[in-house]
Image (spheres, rainbow, N blue to C red):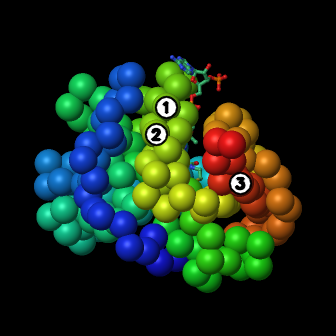
């Protein structure tokens, strides 16, 4: 994966009905530790990292790069959205395309926050890099993630075997410009 390309970063905070999307800040560090150390959030992602390692190794402002959004609810981080360029994806259909990832704290699941935030991030992408298709890879056993992908307009390209599990590669075509 590599960075998105030439986009102005960080953008002005993006407000949705309930959430704010913005670039990471130093005040998010504790929430990043919680998120990246959460076994529940990493069931389908190859396992969480040890909390003490994260406490030691995360920089003062974690995950600060173009396309890395913190999702905030009532002033506190509840999740992360990642938009990167899939330069080295193992499936040719995904290589070079923008790749969407998402990771939310378990206490924020089941409330529609991930869907609301991802839709806003994709809208932002459509504005700054118009015409880009977006890909997404998730384990097919990750039912919540599969449902979210469908809600966001991703459809199946293929399934493939990797990291000891069946993976689902989805694609969201760019929105059709108004006639
Ligand atoms: C994948 C993940 C982001 C999905 O989170 P989520 O909260 O289930 O997703 P959504 O935001 O779409 O919320 C969906 C649920 O909220 C419910 N909901 C409640 N209030 C809602 C509202 N106001 N608006 C919309 N949905 C609402 C929906 O009914 C739905 O419930 P259901 O799944 O039982 O039908 C989350 O499970 C996660 O962070 N997992 C760990 C990371 C991961 O596996 N990432 C995938 C690889 S990229």
Q: Residues within 10 Å of mark 3 (few under 14, many from 20)?
A: some
Mark 2, secondary structure of its residue: helix
Seen from the viewer's position, the closer of residues 122 and 43 is 122
Question: Which residue was labeled with disc 1?
Answer: 116
Question: Which residue was labeled with disc 2?
Answer: 120
Q: Earlier in the sequence, mark 3 or mark 2?
A: 2
Q: Residues within 10 Å of mark 1 (few under 14, many from 20)?
A: some
Mark 1, secondary structure of its residue: helix
Q: Position of residue 147 (x, y in %)?
A: 70, 36
C-alpha distance separating marks 1 and 2: 6 Å
Mark 3, secondary structure of its residue: loop
Seen from the viewer's position, the closer of residues 10 and 131 is 131
Q: Name the quadrant of the C terminus.
A: top right
Q: Any atom of ligand 1 within 8 Å of the CB at mark 1?
A: yes
Left or right of 67 in this view: 33 = left
Q: Position of residue 144 (x, y in %)?
A: 65, 36
């Amino acid at each position: 994966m590599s960075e998105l390309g030439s986009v102005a970063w960080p953008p002005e905070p993006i407000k949705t009905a309930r959430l704010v999307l913005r670039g990471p800040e130093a005040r998010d560090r504790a929430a990043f530790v919680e998120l990246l150390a959460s076994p529940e959030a990493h069931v389908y992602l190859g396992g969480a990292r040890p909390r003490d390692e994260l406490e030691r190794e995360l920089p003062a402002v974690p995950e600060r790069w173009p396309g890395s959004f913190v999702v905030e609810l009532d002033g506190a981080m509840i999740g992360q959205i990642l938009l990167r360029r899939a330069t080295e994806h193992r499936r040719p259909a995904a290589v070079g395309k923008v790749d969407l990832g998402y990771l939310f704290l378990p206490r924020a699941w089941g409330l529609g926050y991930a869907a609301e935030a991802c839709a806003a991030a994709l809208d932002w992408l459509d504005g700054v890099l118009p015409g880009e298709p977006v890909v997404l890879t998730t384990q097919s056993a990750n039912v919540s993630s599969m449902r979210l992908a469908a809600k966001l307009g991703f459809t199946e390209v293929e399934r493939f075997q990797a990291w000891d599990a069946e993976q689902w590669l989805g694609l969201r075509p760019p929105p059709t410009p108004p006639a």
